[in-house]
């Protein structure tokens, strides 16, 4: 199997051989950052295209067909359009916060993005409390949304932002509990170790019922976290026109748009890491032939395949359900998901203590 | 207490209804799509013969229109869409002078397709056709002379 | 039916007596300008249980300061109807709590539907600046804060110092250019103020100068989703007035087309309700199926939205030979697709949670506000004109009036869903039995209605659509009034919205199913 560790080590050694250690580290940082941001944009483009086509298919439509064959160039046309659009400054808005907000949102999602294990060794950030870091990094995106709503000097934006705050802070809890279930099962918080532990069987099989419940709750909460239907109240286009980003135009809007899609990718990526073994191939104990064949498929394909499957699941949900009301969203979390999540954590702990896991 | 009123019952009923919805959309995911790809399907596309897109003057076998320049259509049009210019022509055989149509001017931009002009025309000299691709960049191009 | 003229002094006691005696449905208030004889109003009343009709007319000779006592404490809907009359005729209704203009700007000079109104543009030029709401009093108290930002302290006559937010005129959920001003407390709505008139085209005024066939073209543009029924009402009224008998074939065609139009409208309702609640996929499904009706319309009438089909004495063109087959095919298709809507939207828990118990209106309120159509029937009021005063073929076909009892959003939604099935049922009874005959009867080239007052009403897609014509024997009407289906619904908004949230406003607006050009005319 292709091991990215060898490649990265080779590059590291090469850089060290031609320049002093400090400069080598700076160069590496820049290279890594560049790659991460490029990958981020590339995935965003794929995601936007996928969303359009998948949504169209659910709705008996063809989706974009005009720009390029099957509308393949549609997203590029849109990006170009957004780039040449004027960034409007809003009268009596808080200029600094107004301009800062989209960057905060993008920053939070890039940081989280860099924690995803794309393949063995192909991971930007990997340390012993990786899961914890993901939680922290992803949760400051809400700050950007709150600021955007507050600084826009628009009442729709304000309502959208406050809704978003209430919603995201609630659903962080459920996400935390679901991740905790997996941490209890695996006994580690480091992402590479989490994946390593799933080489012989994914956690969704190892943890059986509690892991499955955790997976479902994680999907619901993750959907809420990314502000997608049925939890898209912060935007709620039929109520608040566009919610917190009503007043944003041009690339500032583009940042929100891209971050929204990438948050979906991140939620799906984390789900596939925690429950479906990240880049670990599908192994069934006892079927060595089958396992060998599976090993030939590169890890990055496994990871992306799983991630896009989860994304497709979330899109399926999004394009099926109506939007909820804010009090229903909050009561779903506090009356249903949180208690069920807590009980589920208890069950998982009992399972692990009694050794009832595979 | 009924089962679907209890906590667990409510959760299960909810999940069931949501799954039904998901099943329906999944079925649509794999059915044939209904999008009509408009300019590409021009050849196969069928517009009803009765569709009102533009006024025209049907010609008889000699290539003449049937208009007698009576002006009923112009008078009945609620929007003043039609202007009729007439000229006097002297009939060579009888020597009587007669009012005939000179220009029949139709402003497509003002027309609301109420069909009153067609209904009042005593000679069926005007009718609507279904040539619907009438978008132009200049309003002036919408003012059309109907008689050739 | 001619109205009963009564003296201005006994209007209140007479109205109170009528209201006590069961005349609980105020169908319309028609403002009138009788020139020398003064201004006045005609009240069309109906008994909601016996369906007995009565029209009361009142005159007020003072043209300078006309005053008529208000009846909005007896019939809540009068609040909006009287504002409309005030707006167009300048009649002040004494005792009305909120005598503002309903459609026109506050700075409009004159009352347009008066016969002596001066239309010249010098008096009412096109105003380029936006309107300052009447209730907003700018105070000179301007505070300058540290950031050099100006905050104008405003006090508001209607809302006080509550947090006000505008929904509309350009807003995805108002389905057109309607504007609500809401006072919010968090997400909860405290008060609502409706502003109409953003697309008022003055159709009633325009009609006074046009001939009857020309007026017909306007009806399609009132409630464009009941285009066919609207036109049916006006044709019926004129045919009644000139004593024209139309053929059976025409009656069949008109009834079938009315019902197809109703299905069309209800499908659009269902789609838009789904979209307002965020279920965009259901919206597309609804539109996909509505397309099939539009194709049938286009084939037969030549128009998809503006169909232009009914004319005085018949219909514009005969049905096409394969019309019956296409309609039958469509009916079969649609019955299957209803199940799909149910699976994906109607029985979905989120939909039910969003709609059940939200935006309730009681039967009494529905009658008092004159909320006909789906809204009234969801509240348990049997208000279907097709049953109350059968016209066309509705007394010959078998169909049941869909009634629900809760009057909430979900019931309003279900009424429409069931009515689609009921309309299909009606069509299936008629489609195979269309008799041979002429599709139109010849009329005189110039239609003059004999002097008198005529009215007719039909069941539009969202309530009772009525036409009132006062003719002085000319080829154009002296006064024509269309009863809007949407205005009573909008008038009832503030009652329905008690304790609702912003998201509920959208659900309520979607299920009330008003169409703005019908409100604004």
Image: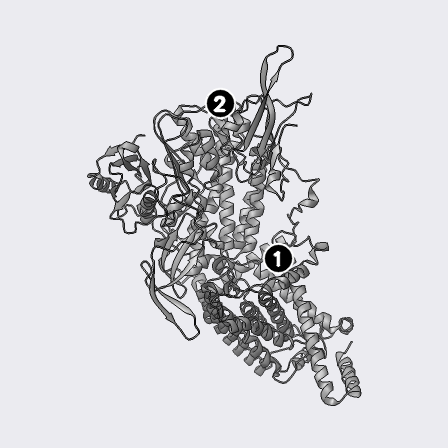
Circles 1 and 2, Cβ within 8 Å, touching? The answer is: no
Above or below for A171 versus C260? below
What residue do we see at 69% from left, 43% from top? B41
Residue C441 circle label: 2
What residue do we see at 63% from left, 42% from top? B136
Which residue is label 1 attached to?
A55
What residue do we see at 62% from left, 44% from top? B137
Above or below for B41 versus A54? above
Residue A286 circle label: none
Does C209 sit left or right of A191 as displayed?
left
Q: Position of residue A107 (x, y in %)?
A: 60, 75
| Nearer to the camera, B21 or C112 | C112
Above or below for B96 versus C197? above
Report whether residue A340 is seen: no
The C terminus of chain C, quarter of image: top left
Disc 1 vs disc 2: which is toward the camera? 2
Does C189 sit left or right of C420 as displayed?
left
| Quadrant of the rendered image containing residue C111 | top left
Q: Secondary structure at mark 1?
A: helix
The subunit letter for the residue under badge 2 reads: C
Q: Position of residue C401 (x, y in %)?
A: 41, 41
Report whether residue C88 is seen: yes
Q: Residues within 10 Å of mark 2 (few under 14, many from 20)?
A: some
Does B59 sit left or right of C437 as displayed?
right
| Nearer to the camera, A187 or C19 | C19
Q: Secondary structure at mark 2?
A: loop
């Amino acid at each position: 199997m292709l091991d990215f560790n060898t490649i990265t080590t080779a590059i590291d050694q090469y850089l060290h051989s031609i320049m002093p250690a400090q400069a080598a580290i700076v160069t590496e940082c820049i290279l890594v950052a560049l790659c991460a941001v490029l990958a981020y944009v590339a995935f965003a483009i794929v995601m936007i295209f996928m969303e359009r086509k998948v949504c169209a298919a659910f709705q008996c439509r063809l989706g974009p067909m005009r720009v390029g064959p099957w509308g393949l160039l549609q997203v590029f046309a849109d990006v170009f359009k957004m780039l040449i659009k004027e960034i409007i400054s809003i009268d009596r808005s808080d200029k600094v916060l107004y301009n800062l907000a989209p960057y905060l949102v993008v920053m939070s999602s890039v940081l989280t993005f860099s924690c995803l294990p794309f393949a063995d060794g192909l991971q930007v950030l990997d340390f012993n409390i990786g899961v914890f870091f993901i939680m922290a990094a992803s949760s400051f995106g809400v700050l950007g949304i709150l600021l955007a709503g507050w600084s826009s000097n628009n009442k729709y934006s304000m309502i959208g932002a406050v809704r978003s705050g209430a919603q995201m802070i609630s659903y962080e809890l459920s996400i935390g509990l679901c991740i905790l279930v997996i941490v209890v099962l695996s006994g580690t918080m480091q992402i590479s170790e989490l994946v390593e532990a799933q080489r012989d069987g994914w956690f969704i099989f190892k943890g059986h019922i509690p892991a499955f419940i955790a997976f479902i709750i994680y999907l619901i909460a993750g959907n809420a976290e990314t502000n997608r239907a049925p939890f898209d109240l912060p935007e709620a286009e039929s109520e608040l026109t566009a919610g917190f980003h009503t007043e944003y135009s041009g690339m500032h809007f583009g940042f929100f748009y891209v971050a929204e899609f990438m948050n979906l990718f991140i939620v799906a990526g984390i789900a596939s890491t925690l429950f479906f073994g990240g880049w670990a191939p599908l192994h069934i104990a006892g079927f060595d032939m089958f396992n060998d064949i599976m090993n030939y498929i590169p890890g990055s394909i496994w990871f992306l395949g799983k991630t896009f499957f989860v994304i497709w699941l979330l899109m399926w949900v999004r394009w099926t359900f109506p939007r909820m009301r804010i009090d229903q969203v909050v009561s779903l979390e506090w009356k249903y998901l949180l208690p069920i999540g807590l009980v589920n954590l208890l069950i998982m702990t009992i399972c692990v203590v009694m050794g009832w896991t595979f | 207490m009924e089962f679907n009123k209890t906590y667990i019952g409510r959760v299960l009923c909810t999940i069931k209804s949501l799954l039904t919805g998901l099943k329906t959309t999944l079925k649509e995911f794999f059915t044939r799509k209904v999008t009509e790809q408009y300019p590409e399907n021009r050849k196969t596309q069928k517009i009803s013969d009765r569709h009102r897109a533009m006024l025209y003057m049907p010609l008889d076998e000699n290539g003449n229109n049937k208009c007698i320049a009576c002006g009923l259509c112009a008078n009945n049009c609620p929007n003043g869409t039609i202007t009729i210019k007439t000229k006097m022509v002297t009939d060579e055989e009888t020597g009587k002078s007669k009012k005939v149509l000179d220009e029949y001017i139709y402003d497509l931009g003002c027309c609301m397709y109420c069909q009153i002009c067609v209904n009042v025309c005593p000679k069926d000299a005007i009718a609507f056709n279904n040539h619907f691709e009438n978008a132009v960049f200049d309003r002036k191009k919408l003012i059309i002379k109907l008689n050739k | 039916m001619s109205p009963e003229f009564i003296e201005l002094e006994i209007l209140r006691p007479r109205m109170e007596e009528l209201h006590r005696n069961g005349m609980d449905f105020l169908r319309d208030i028609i403002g009138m300008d009788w020139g020398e004889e003064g201004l006045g109003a005609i009240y069309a009343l109906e008994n909601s249980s016996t369906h007995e009709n009565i029209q009361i007319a009142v005159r007020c000779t003072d043209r300078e300061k006309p005053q008529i006592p208000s009846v909005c404490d007896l019939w809540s809907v009068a609040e909006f109807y009287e504002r409309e009359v005030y707006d167009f005729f300048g009649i002040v209704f004494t005792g009305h709590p909120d005598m503002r203009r309903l459609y026109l700007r506050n700075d409009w000079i004159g009352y347009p539907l008066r016969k002596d109104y001066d239309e010249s543009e010098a008096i009412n030029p096109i105003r380029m600046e936006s309107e300052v709401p009447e209730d907003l009093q700018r105070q000179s108290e301007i505070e300058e804060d540290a950031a050099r930002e100006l905050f104008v302290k405003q006090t508001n006559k209607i809302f006080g110092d509550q947090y006000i937010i505008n929904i509309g005129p350009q807003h995805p959920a108002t389905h057109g250019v309607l504007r609500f001003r809401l006072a919010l407390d968090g997400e909860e709505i405290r008060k609502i103020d409706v502003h109409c008139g953003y697309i008022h085209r003055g159709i009633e005024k325009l009609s006074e100068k046009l001939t009857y066939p020309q007026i017909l073209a306007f009806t399609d543009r009132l409630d464009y989703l009941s285009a066919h029924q609207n036109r049916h009402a006006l044709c019926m009224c004129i045919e009644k007035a000139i004593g024209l008998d139309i053929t059976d074939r025409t009656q069949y065609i008109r009834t079938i087309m009315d019902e197809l139009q109703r299905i069309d409208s209800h499908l659009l309702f269902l789609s838009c309700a789904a979209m307002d609640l965020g279920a965009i996929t259901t919206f597309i499904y609804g539109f996909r199926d509505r397309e099939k009706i539009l194709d049938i319309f286009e084939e037969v009438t030549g128009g998809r939205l503006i169909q232009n089909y009914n004319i005085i004495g018949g219909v514009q063109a005969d049905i096409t030979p394969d019309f019956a087959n296409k309609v039958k095919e469509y009916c079969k298709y649609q019955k299957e697709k209803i199940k799909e809507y149910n699976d994906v939207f109607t029985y979905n828990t989120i939909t039910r949670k969003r709609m059940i118990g939200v935006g309730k209106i009681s039967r009494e309120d529905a009658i008092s506000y004159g909320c006909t159509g789906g809204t009234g029937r969801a509240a348990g009021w049997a208000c279907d004109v097709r049953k109350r005063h059968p016209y066309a073929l509705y007394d010959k076909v078998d169909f049941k009036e869909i009634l629900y009892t809760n009057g909430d959003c979900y019931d309003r939604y279900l009424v429409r869903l069931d009515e689609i099935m009921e309309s299909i049922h009606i069509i299936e009874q008629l489609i195979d039995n269309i008799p041979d005959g002429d599709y139109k009867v010849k009329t005189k080239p110039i239609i003059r209605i004999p002097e008198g007052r005529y009215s007719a009403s039909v069941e539009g897609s969202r309530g009772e659509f009525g036409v009132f014509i006062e003719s002085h024997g000319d080829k154009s009407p002296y006064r024509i009034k269309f009863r809007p289906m949407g205005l009573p619904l909008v008038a009832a908004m503030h009652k329905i919205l008690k304790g609702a949230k912003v998201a509920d406003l959208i659900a309520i607006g979607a299920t009330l199913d008003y169409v703005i050009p019908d409100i604004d005319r």
